[in-house]
Amino acid sequence: MEFKRKDRQVIEYGIVAVLSVLGYLILMWIFTGRGPFSHNTYNSYALQAEAWTRGHLDLGENYSYLELAIFNGKYYVSFPPFPSYILFPLAFIFGSNTPDHLLIWIEDLVTVVYLYRLALRFIRKPQLCALTAIFVMLGTNATFNLLNPWVWFAAQTLCFMLAVMAIWYACEGKGGLSLFLWACSVGCRPMQALFLPVFLIILYGKECRIELREVAAVKKKKPVMEEEEDRFDRRPEDVAAEVAEKEAKMKELSESGADSAAEEAEPVTELKEVIIRPTLLDILKKRWKWAIPAGIVALSYMILNYARFGSITEFGHNYLPEFMEAEHGQFDLFYLKNNFHMLLNLPSFDGEKRMEIDHFGNLNFMIASPFIIFALAMIIVMLVKKQWKLAAFDGVVLVPCSAYLFVTIMPKTMGGWHFGNRYTNDILPWLYLTVALALGKAPEAGKYQIPVCIFGMCLNAVGLVVVYNGMYIV
């Protein structure tokens, strides 16, 4: 009965998490007019998918309002191609008018389901799992992307979903599917490649197994006193005398037992948990097929890139006119100083002490996504609780996250038209994993998410409505 009650709670709180995200999307639809059946103006991926159905790699014409790569006089989509893989079969039916808004809503709901399931792997309380999943979905800057399938945001939203799913299946030990989804996420946001080592560490941990093995041990015979019948009619003084006599006899037997320990010992075996760690060669022999699906996806990217731009690593961004004409190109250390300031930019206020919202002025990424602050705080909690292995894994995750942030401040732009600091949203699935692990060890800290989550939800909801409705400062 207890199991059924627990199982029912898991389902109920999962529904709560999904309905929370759906309710948020509906509310933002009301405020901005962007619903599941809206038309997508900046539909580069749909145009590319439609071109593929006609047997063309280029778009055939210039769309001046889109960021297109120009190479050998032809116009190509300048973004990583995987979202067009999803739209390709739909393009046979809808052409370039694929239901992009509806698809992004579906992606949002799939994402929260997997976030919830991922938390359930480590946290016993389903209500805490639901809270954590809602926090990272609605209390961070990821909300700005959830509503809008414009080419810049569609790839990030799809990447978020694929990364969460890949992490989930890695924790399940399903390496082939996990690496396949990771490869798909790289086709949305190429710097997701930085997280491959974390996947391999998780999958290696799943390959290690615990076995019960017999080990030699020595068992000593202990002096045993005969138990006397516990009679209710004994007088207190008789009981006291018997206790004193028993203690004296026990002392005598213990001393005699200590002197003849060797004689009293007898060899025995006992079961003990032993961790079996396979070698890298063992894993390669056993799991080499895991690499096939991811390898096929990666190969498709390389073929497509080479067919369009003559390079297996070029997906078109370097052929955007704005970067070709820039003195320092697309990526350069020259941009570091200004972009680092944009990464940590604090809010500005007008003469009446009201916060100014700018559609091109990046906001400090930890203010826009306070979940990051909570994640760092949970790492400190793990250190205080001396959860060294868990803290060490968190440190491993922070390495590619830090590298990712460094990469985000190297390009000429820092996200363009948006509220917050959207490039940094790509590290959220990984920080979510560290939080879920930590809350599994310290669930009492979960309640402190609530005020931080409310802050993040309010800030990003206001910023989203202001920017999408064009009410920002100019």
Image (cartoon, rainbow, N blue to C red):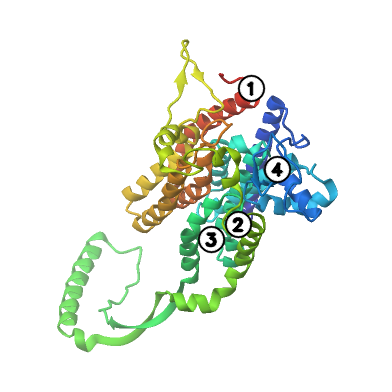
Q: Amino acid at mark 4?
A: Ser
Q: Measured along the vertical axis of the image, is residue 381 above or below residue 199?
A: above
Work out whether mark 4 precedes mark 1 in sequence or the reverse, and give the earlier one: 4
Q: Nearer the viewer, mark 3 or mark 1?
A: 1
* 405 left or right of 217 in image: right
Q: Amino acid at mark 2?
A: Phe
Question: Which quarter of the picture shows residue 217?
Answer: bottom left
Q: Residues within 10 Å of mark 4 (few under 14, many from 20)?
A: many
Query: Is residue 462 or residue 276 the one in the foreground?
Result: 462
Work out whether mark 3 precedes mark 2 in sequence or the reverse, and give the earlier one: 2
Q: Residues within 10 Å of mark 2 (few under 14, many from 20)?
A: few
Q: How many numbered dots are placed on residues in this image? A: 4
Q: CA distance from mark 3 to mark 2?
A: 23 Å
Rendered image: mark on residue 3: 2
Q: Nearer the viewer, mark 3 or mark 4?
A: 4
Q: Measured along the vertical axis of the image, is residue 264 above or below residue 73?
A: below
Q: Nearer the viewer, mark 2 or mark 1?
A: 1
Residue 419 visible here: yes
Q: Amino acid at mark 1?
A: Gly
Asked if marks 3 and 4 touch (Cβ < 8 Å), the reply is: no
Query: Is residue 441 or residue 173 the one in the foreground?
Result: 173
Residue 441 visible here: no
Which residue in the protein does label 3 denote? 171
Q: CA distance from mark 2 to mark 1?
A: 51 Å
Asked if marks 2 and 1 touch (Cβ < 8 Å), the reply is: no
Rendered image: mark on residue 202: none
Where is residue 390 drawn, in percent x and y? 39, 56
Where is residue 38 drawn, in percent x and y? 77, 34
Which residue in the protein does label 4 denote? 44
Where is residue 148 drawn, in percent x and y? 67, 36
Where, quadrant-wise, is the N terminus in this rendering?
A: bottom right
